[in-house]
Image (spheres, rainbow, N blue to C red):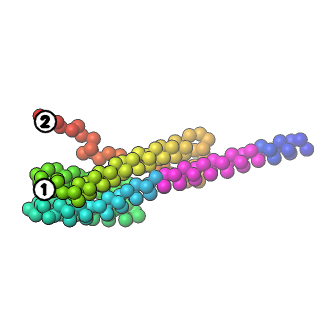
Amino acid sequence: MGIVYIILIVLAIVAVWLIATFNGLIRSKNQVDEAFSDIDVQLKRRYDLIPNLVETVKGYMSHEAGTLEKVTAARAAAMSVHDDKNATLAQREQAENMLSNTLKSLFAVTESYPDLKASQNFLQLQDELSDTENKIQAARRFYNSNVRDFNTKIQVFPTNMIAGMLKFAKYDFFQASEGEKQNVKVQF
């Protein structure tokens, strides 16, 4: 009878370990999904701010229509990829980086318009957009830290055996675009 109790105790310990491991993997996966959702919330906020910014700038920059059209097109492209459930992380990154670059070019062009730079509405929208960009970066860092933790969890022994059997897959990290990795040229 003693050996039966030992086997039952070992089986109970293994069952508790399997349940705890599975629940830990699910908890980590949900944290990654939540972090990705946080990025989506900030991107949606940016998408909502851009039309107001373009409308504000339009009145001051009538002969810079090409720049405004590029911003509008980049926003539309980013929203399209954002809404596509089959879009890969790389496609999302590319669309968002294109939008960020067109916004940078818009703000560079606005330097030539002192009246626009003095407009309270423009300054408020610029501050909100800047704040949103900072929140997007923070959300991406939070996502990447959750991805790191989850990927580590599914790769270390003995959790990797359970993760492999249950088909848990690695998540990709958000990474800087090639343009953002270039050295900044400073000229005096």
Q: Indicate whether 69 appears above or below 174.
A: below
Q: What's the mark number on residue 47?
A: none
Residue 96, percent from left and from top: 30, 55
Q: Residue at x 31, y 63 (%)?
A: 48
| Mark 1 and mark 2: Cα distance apart in space | 27 Å
Seen from the viewer's position, the closer of residues 185 and 182 is 185
Mark 1 or mark 2: name the one nearer the start of the chain: 1
Disc 1 residue type (three-letter): Asp
Residue 21 lies in magenta, yes or no?
A: yes
Residue 109, percent from left and from top: 14, 53
Task: Say which residue label 2 marks.
Answer: 187
Which range of residues does the magenta coloring cover? 11-34
Label 2: which secondary element: loop
Label 1: which secondary element: helix
Task: Say which residue label 1 marks.
Answer: 115
Q: Residue at x 16, y 64 (%)?
A: 58
Magenta residues, dominant SS class: helix
Q: Is residue 55 left or right of residue 154?
A: left
Q: Indicate whether 5 appears above or below 95.
A: above
Q: Residue at x 29, y 61 (%)?
A: 49
Residue 42 lies in magenta, yes or no?
A: no
How many residues crowd around disc 2 within 10 Å: few (fewer than 14), some, or many (20 or more)? few
Which quadrant of the view contains residue 7? top right
**Residue 111 visible in the shown view:** yes
Residue 55, percent from left and from top: 20, 65
Which is in the foreground here, disc 1 or disc 2?
A: 1
